[in-house]
Image (spheres, helix red, strand yellow):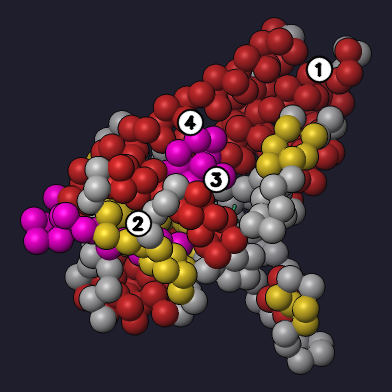
Amino acid sequence: VVLLDQTALPVEERFLRLTTVAEVVDAIGRLAVRGAPALGVAGAYGVALAAHAHGEIPDAATLEAAVQALRTARPTAVNLARGVDRAAARLADGAAAVLAEARALAEEEATASVAMGRRGASLILSLVGASRASAVRLLTHCNTGALATVEGGTALAVAFTLHEQGRLGGMLVAETRPLLQGARLTAWELARRGVPYRLIVDGAGPYLLARGEADAVIVGADRVCANGDVVNKVGTYAHALGAARVGVPFVVVAPETTVDLSTPDGAAVEIEDRGADEVVRFGRVPVAAAGAAAANPAFDVTPADLVTALVTERRVVRYDKGERP
Ligand code: MRU
């Protein structure tokens, strides 16, 4: 499995060649590959690696252990377990069938991205109204582009589509502490595609919304629950509160593979805790007093009543009109 090492961006474009399940699990755990749809695809390819096993026929216990290690490499994004399970369901048909399933999932995610971009762009234009529709200004959090999916993106696909239509005024990109997916990854993707943006610190989001500097907030999701709650990168909830306070639309863009009707609400989701190190250090540099304790939830829950709409490749769910997934 060959993938772009997202921990090295934007300084270096370095590709990893992963040849064992343990290497895939490690890459997922340290966010060399990340973002809900990309995790699902990486997990599926991990199962393909397990099935291939360097030409040997792996025994059932080895395969089962590999599947478990992959599906639990990170807990919050439902796509990971789903991608792994989908590929694992083909194990009885042999390694080629598992690989074909992983490839099919990757292609489906890429196709979904195009549909989400189009649907989301037309929704945003209708929500912001005619006076803003020629130069829409969007605020986003974390990274929801090609890096987080396979191609295109989810929320960023909407921004890219509006940019192609000549209707994007600019983006506000929240840096996304502590691992800086906004600063390191989203800014990199937007720059490569010539999309105008300004980077902001996470805490500036609600204030800039109050100051009228964005017409809508667009974010992705790691899991959308049956009651409509949205689990996404920590910091999302604050932008949603800020948007609701001033009546700015808050739009979630995610493929159907992220919608999990078997999870009743956000309280039922395991929120990954990534430990103190990422908070008390900035990269390798200590930024807190020696011995500082820290809490580091990697995700938060935005309650459904703060969400204007969910856009998937198949539908637009208008929460603001009482609809739920
Ligand atoms: O910890 P990460 O970087 O995997 O978190 C990613 C996010 O929270 C994204 O917003 C989400 O997965 C949607 S990706 C299209």
Can the viewer see residue 300?
yes
Residue 262 in the image: x percent, y percent? Answer: 46, 40
User: Could you say whether the residue bearing mark 1 is in a helix, strand or loop?
Assistant: helix
Amino acid type of the residue that numbered disc 1 sits on in the rendered structure: His
Q: Which of marks 2 and 1 is in front?
A: 2
Residue 50 in the image: x percent, y percent? Answer: 80, 24
User: In the image, which disc is placed on residue 52?
Assistant: 1
Amino acid type of the residue that numbered disc 3 sits on in the rendered structure: Ala
Label 1 near label 3: C-beta < 8 Å? no
Amino acid type of the residue that numbered disc 2 sits on in the rendered structure: Ile
Q: What stretch is highlighted in magenta?
A: 126-154
Q: Mark 4 points at which residue?
A: 109
Whole-number angstrom distance, CA of label 2 to CA of label 1: 40 Å
Counting every numbered tag in the picture gives: 4
Q: Is mark 2 within 8 Å of ligand 1?
A: no
Q: How crowded is mark 4: few (under 14 residues within 10 Å), some or many (20 or more)?
A: many
Q: How crowded is mark 1: few (under 14 residues within 10 Å), some or many (20 or more)?
A: some
User: In the image, which disc is placed on residue 148?
Assistant: 3
The answer to whether residue 39 is left or right of residue 227 is right
Q: Does the residue labelled 3 lie within 8 Å of ligand 1?
A: yes
Residue 45 in the image: x percent, y percent? Answer: 69, 27
Mark with earlier residue (3, 1): 1
Q: Mark 2 points at which residue?
A: 218
Is 97 above or below relative to 276? above
The N terminus: image quadrant:
top right
Whole-number angstrom distance, CA of label 3 to CA of label 2: 15 Å
User: Could you say whether the residue bearing mark 3 is in a helix, strand or loop?
Assistant: helix
